[in-house]
Amino acid sequence: MAFYESIFIARQELGEKEIEKTIESFKGILEKNSADLVDTELWGLRNLAYKIEKNKKGHYVVLKISGNGEAIHELERNMRIDENIIRYLSIKTDIINTEPSILAKKAQEG
Amino acid sequence: MQKDRKNEDNDSSGSKPFFRRKKTCPFSGPEAIAIDFRDTRTLNKFISERGKIIPARISAVSAPKQRKLAQAIKRARILALMPYLA
């Protein structure tokens, strides 16, 4: 078992409910692959530093996962299929920090 | 080669009219800042106006930390938190 952080950027047009739904579906995928979704973090709608597929803004979501690499592989495969996801990045971490990061705090403030 | 080096050393330590304090690595030592790809405010200090990563010989970041820093900047770029080119 290892810890991962999977961050993805969803299209700007998506509503909160749709994002929740996407997170739920990813949670299902992870559980099927015997991985746990420990925590999620929303960074909200942020400006992108450069355009990705003609999008200027995107919703940032962080999934904090405890599981093995195969689960991450399957998750990334599904992220590639989903057209509402314009970018993703998965990172292996030593520990899972459940405290909100700087960007999450910023999103909460305003 | 060796002779040249010696001369350089003498120049910088002795005859210069102003004293330049030696910069130290901001990510090492007791007051070290953590390197995190989410912390774009810190990372922005280590890129040029053009968006390029500043070499360690100028920013005085230690070699192991420069590797971590470069990795963090590249991750931030992938997630469009920082520009590839500005």
Image (tube, coloured by chain):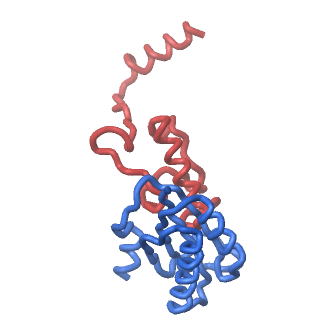
Chain colours: A blue, B red
Q: How many marks?
A: 0
Relative image position of residue B15 (x, y in whole percent): 39, 17
Relative image position of residue A26 (x, y in whole percent): 57, 77
- Residue B44 can be seen, yes or no: no
Identify which residue is drawn at 54% across, 76% down: A47
Q: Residue furthest left?
A: B30
Q: Is residue B38 left or right of residue A47?
A: left
Residue B61 lies in quadrant = top left
Identify which residue is drawn at 45% across, 17% down: B11
Q: Nearer the viewer, residue A99 or A72?
A: A72
Relative image position of residue A108 (x, y in whole percent): 36, 80
Q: Is residue A50 left or right of residue A96?
A: right
Identify which residue is drawn at 52% across, 62% down: A67
Residue B77 lies in quadrant = bottom right
Q: Is residue B13 above or below residue A41?
A: above
Relative image position of residue A38 (x, y in whole percent): 43, 70
Quadrant of image for the N terminus of chain B: top right
Quadrant of image for the C terminus of chain B: bottom right
Residue B81 lies in quadrant = bottom right
Identify which residue is drawn at 55% across, 63% down: B82
Q: Is residue A14 above or below residue B6?
A: below
Q: Nearer the viewer, residue A97 or B77?
A: A97
Q: Nearer the viewer, residue A23 or A101?
A: A23
- Residue B79 can be seen, yes or no: yes
